[in-house]
């Protein structure tokens, strides 16, 4: 299979031959930072455009269609507008924390990018606790929201932040448990191991019904953790104006907006890696001919294809389902998702011990 | 039994959610169902709905005749004094004085397009038109005279 | 001093400064945020030592769990946004003495015994090793504390469920029955002369 190892290794060797190890580290970090920021900008523009298009077509509308082909430059123009706008800080706000919160949200989103394998041999940090790292860092994202809600000195912001906190804290449980099912099957927390374990078929096909249930629970929990409809109580427009970012304007608002979409991309990338094989092409057991044909499609296309499929699924939820009430939200988590995923984890453990999976 | 109820509840919920997703998915994969009108582009082919209320008009036939008797029912019906009917007296062939329409003044800038005048008109002389491009540079041009110059009341309309 | 040492001192300084600010800040929410950043600094130290598992657990438990809980309780507190008054002189002196005592105590310890450099080899603990160690029954196994802690958590979970359970059925029936009685009382006409009957509005129109 074609690997990007050759490129990354040649860059490393070229730098090593010329500079000391410290400078190599610094320059490589700079390259990674530039790539990450470029990815963020591109993803922000594309995902916002995609969301508006999907929403429009599900509501029998056309969506943005004036600026460029199919309105693809609409989001760039919107970003330009937001950059030119004044970033207001309310009088009664805690000024430092108010300006600090968007950066917390953004930094957390950036940290989450580290262990994701974008293609064969193309990963920022192949950390040996990959999945645990992700669930640890993503528990930080709630803090940015709480800071923003508190520092705004606005009742809508505070209520939105409280709701968001309760929601993220409780849905993290079932997300974690559904991630654990795959960890149990693979026997490793490392992203590369999880992808390699799906060489002869993705877990969603190999793991029977329990893994499919885990996948569904993961998607529901991921939708809730990114504060998207039908779980968008934290920013419910009809009740709380805009929730925790009511007081934000200009680029500070744009950072929240961007971080929301980056978080969607990241949870979908994790879902694709765990359940749909990451960059691993579609393989069917022992059909070498078929597998060989599939290998011709580059691994990054597989990864982004699967991720965008999951993103589309989440957008589909958003534009179909009405918002839940707070008590319904917590009922769903504590009475349905958590017991089901606990029982499911037990089943998967049984499958893993008895080697019943393919 | 509790477990059975629990599972059937989940199954029902899943089914109803899937019904909703099927509908939006149905629209998503069929771009032809889009009902958006791309307005300035399709100006030539744009056809408004029959019941659309754009402005009050007074249709005239080919002989430059209208059906307005000058009864001022529309003026009375109008909630915000948009219409002012100026009447005059004409001599009938029998040398009798008869009330007739002189000028039908219509202030489009005050009109809420509610259509009460059309409902009130006993002779069907006014209608709601389909034109909706009303922006002008001078406000005074929004005060319109609806009966055409030299027009007369149609024969037989009382 | 190599790069690694510079990073270590930077992280340590960050942690200490944040801890100091958490103690001295007069706004309680800001204190919680400084405490949080101090915890993140400790997690960064664990990452620096390449014990990623401990670092992730530090973030999950302390930052994502305990500090978020603290922030929630601040949210639910009255007048949490107002500035707190400064401490009294007595308290300042007492805390300064306590800090001085702690400093001399630990300085004395370090001065006498120093840091042993026995662990010069880097840790090479994989996650599965930690898991095996947790559940092993051999001499250095942690099976007993692990099981005791899991029992504690289980009892906490059961306690939560018991608290959250609906009240027993008798009470439920009573609350359902009560509104019916009230409605019956209201709709009964008290005076015979009153013609207006809310339940049958059709009769009024006929009369």
Image (cartoon, coloured by chain):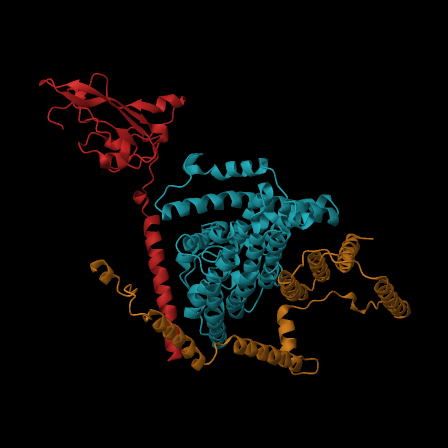
Query: In the rendered view, does A86 fall on the left or right side of B9?
Result: right
Residue A121 in view: no
Chain C colour is: orange
Relative to residue C135, is residue A217 depicted above or below? Answer: above
**x and y percent of residue B11 in the render?**
36, 68
**x and y percent of residue A39 in the render?**
56, 45
Chain letter of the red region: B
Chain A colour is: cyan
Relative to residue C197, is residue A89 depicted above or below? Answer: above
Query: In the rendered view, does B113 fall on the left or right side of B89?
Result: right
A270 or B119: nearer the viewer: B119
**x and y percent of residue A218 in the render?**
48, 63
Residue B22 in view: yes
**Residue at x 30% of width, y 37% of height:** B114
Could you say which quadrant of the image residue C54 lies in?
Answer: bottom right
**x and y percent of residue A192 in the render?**
56, 60
**Residue at x 41% of width, y 44% of height:** A53
Could you say which quadrant of the image residue B110 lies in?
Answer: top left
B27 or A119: nearer the viewer: B27
Query: In the rendered view, does B22 fall on the left or right side of C125?
Result: left
Q: Which residue lies furthest to the front in this view?
A: C193
**Residue at x 36% of width, y 21% of height:** B141
For the image shown, how many numbered marks are present on the structure? 0
A263 or A120: nearer the viewer: A263
Q: Pick the quarter of the image with the C terminus of chain A.
A: bottom left
B3 or C173: nearer the viewer: C173
**Residue at x 43% of width, y 76% of height:** C175
């Amino acid at each position: 299979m074609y690997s990007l190892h050759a490129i990354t290794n040649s860059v490393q060797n070229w730098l090593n031959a010329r500079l000391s190890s410290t400078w190599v580290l610094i320059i490589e970090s700079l390259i990674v930072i530039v790539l990450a920021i470029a990815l963020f900008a591109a993803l922000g523009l594309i995902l916002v455009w995609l969301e508006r298009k999907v929403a429009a077509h599900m509501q029998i509308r056309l969506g943005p269609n004036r600026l460029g082909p199919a309105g693809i430059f609409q989001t760039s123009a919107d970003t330009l507008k937001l950059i030119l706008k004044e970033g207001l800080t309310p009088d009664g706000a805690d000024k430092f924390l108010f300006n600090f919160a968007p950066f917390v949200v953004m930094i957390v989103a950036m940290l989450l990018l580290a262990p994701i394998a974008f293609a064969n041999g193309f990963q920022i940090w192949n950390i040996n606790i990959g999945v645990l790292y992700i669930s640890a860092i993503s528990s930080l994202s709630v803090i940015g929201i709480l800071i923003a809600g508190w520092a705004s000195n606005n009742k809508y912001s505070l209520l939105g932040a409280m709701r968001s906190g309760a929601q993220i804290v409780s849905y993290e449980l079932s997300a974690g448990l559904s991630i654990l099912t795959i960890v149990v099957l693979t026997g490793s927390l490392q992203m590369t191991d999880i992808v390699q374990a799906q060489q002869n078929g993705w877990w969603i096909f190999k793991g029977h019904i329990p893994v499919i249930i885990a996948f569904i629970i993961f998607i529901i929990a991921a939708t809730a953790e990114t504060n998207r409809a039908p779980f968008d109580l934290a920013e419910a427009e009809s009740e709380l104006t805009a929730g925790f970012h009511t007081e934000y304007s200009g680029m500070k608002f744009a950072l929240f907006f961007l971080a929301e979409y980056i978080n969607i991309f990241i949870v979908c990338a994790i879902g694709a890696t765990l359940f749909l094989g990451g960059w691993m092409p579609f393989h069917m057991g022992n059909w070498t001919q078929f597998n060989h044909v599939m290998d011709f499609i580059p691994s990054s296309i597989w990864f982004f294809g699967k991720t965008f499929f999951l993103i589309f699924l989440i957008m589909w939820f958003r534009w179909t389902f009405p918002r839940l009430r707070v008590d319904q939200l917590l009922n769903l988590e504590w009475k349905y998702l958590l017991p089901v995923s606990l029982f499911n984890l037990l089943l998967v453990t049984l499958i893993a011990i008895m080697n019943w999976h393919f | 039994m509790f477990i059975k109820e629990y599972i059937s509840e989940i199954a029902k919920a899943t089914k109803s959610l899937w019904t909703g997703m099927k509908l939006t998915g149905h629209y998503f994969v069929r771009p032809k169902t889009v009902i958006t009108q791309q307005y300035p582009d399709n100006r030539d082919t744009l056809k408004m709905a029959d019941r659309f209320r754009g402005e009050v008009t007074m249709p005239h036939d080919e002989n430059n005749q209208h059906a307005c008797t000058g009864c001022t029912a529309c003026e009375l019906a109008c909630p915000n004094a948009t219409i002012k009917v100026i009447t005059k007296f004409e001599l009938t062939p029998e040398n009798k004085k008869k009330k007739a329409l002189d000028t039908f003044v219509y202030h489009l800038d005050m009109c809420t397009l509610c259509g009460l005048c059309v409902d009130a008109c006993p002779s069907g002389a006014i209608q709601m038109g389909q034109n909706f491009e009303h922006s002008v540079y001078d406000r005074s041009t929004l005060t319109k005279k609806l009966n055409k110059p030299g027009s007369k009341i149609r024969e037989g309309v009382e | 001093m190599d790069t690694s040492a510079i990073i270590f001192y930077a992280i340590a300084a960050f942690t200490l400064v944040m801890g100091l600010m958490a103690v001295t800040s007069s706004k309680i929410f800001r204190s919680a945020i400084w405490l949080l950043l101090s915890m993140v600094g400790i997690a960064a130290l664990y990452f620096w030592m390449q014990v990623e598992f401990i670092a992730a657990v530090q973030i999950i438990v302390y930052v994502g769990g305990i500090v978020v809980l603290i922030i929630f309780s601040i949210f639910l507190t009255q007048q949490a946004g107002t500035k707190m008054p400064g401490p009294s002189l007595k308290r300042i002196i007492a805390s300064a003495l306590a800090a001085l005592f702690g400093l001399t105590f630990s300085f004395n310890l370090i001065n006498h015994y120093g840091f042993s450099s026995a662990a010069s080899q880097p840790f090479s603990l994989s996650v599965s090793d930690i898991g095996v160690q947790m559940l092993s029954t051999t001499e250095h196994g942690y099976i007993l504390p692990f099981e005791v802690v899991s029992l504690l958590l289980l009892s906490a979970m059961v306690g939560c469920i018991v608290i959250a359970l609906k009240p027993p059925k008798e009470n439920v029936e009573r609350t359902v029955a009560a509104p019916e009685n009230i409605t019956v009382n209201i709709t009964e006409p008290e005076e015979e002369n009153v013609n207006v009957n809310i339940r049958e509005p059709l009769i009024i129109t006929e009369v």
